[in-house]
């Protein structure tokens, strides 16, 4: 008999680790985690970890024979910068991996006669604004506006959103009897800023890179213009949003894809916030043409009215609280500890 469980892919990342901690406290279901990388030892007792690749079909087949998934949090992905250098691999991980999991969720939904919840984090990269004039004119975008991404990562995310809608509304539509569909829900995140995860070169990482460099006393050359504006969110709010959307009653939801955001600011404003906390920081601007073009194609703000209306979304961290209570104290402590060690 299959064991009921919650599946988290990409569980070794900060969102995954926070989900493990939260779900271990709030859910009676056991947690199964899947990732190429190990999870921290302190979380090992809270879940069953399977080291492995989301593209390993034999591994997925084995898990399906052992588990009946109530909820799937599909966090595993190849992120934006690496996706541009390895577009074929990005498609395999981001699209083929998602498709395989959607198929698993669809088949399990039909077999048990109840929908499996499939929670998918999407991205501001799904947008593609054609030029700066349009970005200034259409400053705050709704979910369906300017969905013309210019990056492989954005293309992957937008397509996977549509795949999720297909599997939740149209899968096997020509069959004699209508099957039970999975319950697909997706969040489009802005740039996420973490006090605990070191930036890995993503397109929105110029903000957190400023902070981490300043806290270490290293100079930093920002790869976008000072006037570049993007939406951002503190990492704890991202975790909260995923949990809130997963828990929202299905009858309250009017869409499958929801924007969530917290605050927007320019790269110059971000520098000013960093300088306020670290007055000796050395931050210059040396725009990279390719990355600048990507940032210019993403909206200055994301309209999250639907999430606020349908399931009560409201970020806990605005700009000042994000810096004053979450980012600066924890990043400062991180590197002070490193110096002491």
Image: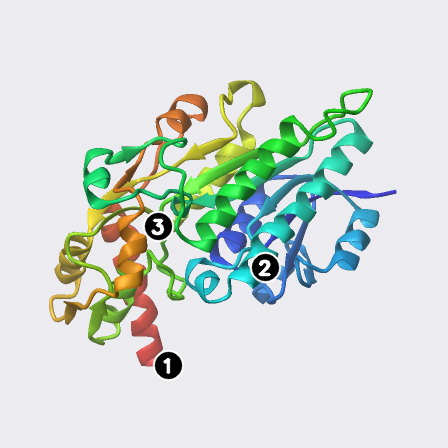
Residue 87, x across and y down, in percent = 51, 61
Which is nearer the N-term, disc 3 or disc 1?
3
Residue 167, x across and y down, in percent = 65, 33
Element under disc 2: helix
**Residue 18 seen in this snapshot:** yes
- Pair 3/1: label in front: 3
From the viewer's perspective, is residue 103 above or below residue 15? above
From the viewer's perspective, is residue 119 above or below residue 338? above
Figure quadrant of the N terminus:
top right
From the viewer's perspective, is residue 274 above or below residue 189? below
Which is nearer the N-term, disc 2 or disc 1?
2
Q: Which quadrant of the view contains residue 25?
A: top right
Q: Using the image, tell me which numbered label, if any, was put on residue 43.
A: 2
Q: Residue at x 56, y 56 (%)?
A: 91
199 left or right of 224?
right
234 left or right of 165?
left
Q: Using the image, tell me which numbered label, if any, was put on residue 341.
A: 1
Q: Residue at x 21, y 70 (%)?
A: 221
Figure quadrant of the C terminus:
bottom left
Which is nearer the N-term, disc 3 or disc 2?
2
Label 3 sits on residue: 191
* Separation (CA) of disc 2 from disc 1: 24 Å
Element under disc 1: loop
Q: Residues within 10 Å of mark 2 (few under 14, many from 20)?
A: some
* Separation (CA) of disc 3 from disc 1: 31 Å
**Residue 120 seen in this snapshot:** no
Residue 152, x across and y down, in percent = 47, 54
Element under disc 3: strand
């Amino acid at each position: 008999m299959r064991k009921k469980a919650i599946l988290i892919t990409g569980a070794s990342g900060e969102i995954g680790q926070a989900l493990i901690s939260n779900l271990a406290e709030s859910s009676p279901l056991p947690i199964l985690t899947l990732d190429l990388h190990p999870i921290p030892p302190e979380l090992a007792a809270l879940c069953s970890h399977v080291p492995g690749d989301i593209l390993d079909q034999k591994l997925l087949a084995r898990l399906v024979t052992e588990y009946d998934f109530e909820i799937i949090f599909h966090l595993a992905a190849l992120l934006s910068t690496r996706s541009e250098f390895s577009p074929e691999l990005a498609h395999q991980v981001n699209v083929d991996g998602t498709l395989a999991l959607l198929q698993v969720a669809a088949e399990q939904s039909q077999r048990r006669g109840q929908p499996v919840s499939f929670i998918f984090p999407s991205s501001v990269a799904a947008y593609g604004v054609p030029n700066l004039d349009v970005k200034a004119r259409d400053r705050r975008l709704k979910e369906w506006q300017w969905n013309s991404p210019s990056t492989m990562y954005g293309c992957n995310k937008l397509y996977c959103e549509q795949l999720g809608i297909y599997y939740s509304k149209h899968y096997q539509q020509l069959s004699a009897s209508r099957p039970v569909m999975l319950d697909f829900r997706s969040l489009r995140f802005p740039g996420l800023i973490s006090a605990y995860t070191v930036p890995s070169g993503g397109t929105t990482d110029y903000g957190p890179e400023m902070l981490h460099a300043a806290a270490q006393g290293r100079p930093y050359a920002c790869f976008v213009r000072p006037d570049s504006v993007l939406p951002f969110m503190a990492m704890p709010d991202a975790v909260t949003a995923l949990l809130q959307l997963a828990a929202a009653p299905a009858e309250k939801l009017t869409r499958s894809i929801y924007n969530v955001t917290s605050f927007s600011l320019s790269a110059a404003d971000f520098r000013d916030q960093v300088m306020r906390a670290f007055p000796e920081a050395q931050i210059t601007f040396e725009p990279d043409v390719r990355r600048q073009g990507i940032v210019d194609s993403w909206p200055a703000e994301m309209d999250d009215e639907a999430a606020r209306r349908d399931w009560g979304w409201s970020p806990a961290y605005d700009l000042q609280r994000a810096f004053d209570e979450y980012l600066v104290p924890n990043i400062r402590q991180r590197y002070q500890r490193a110096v002491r060690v």
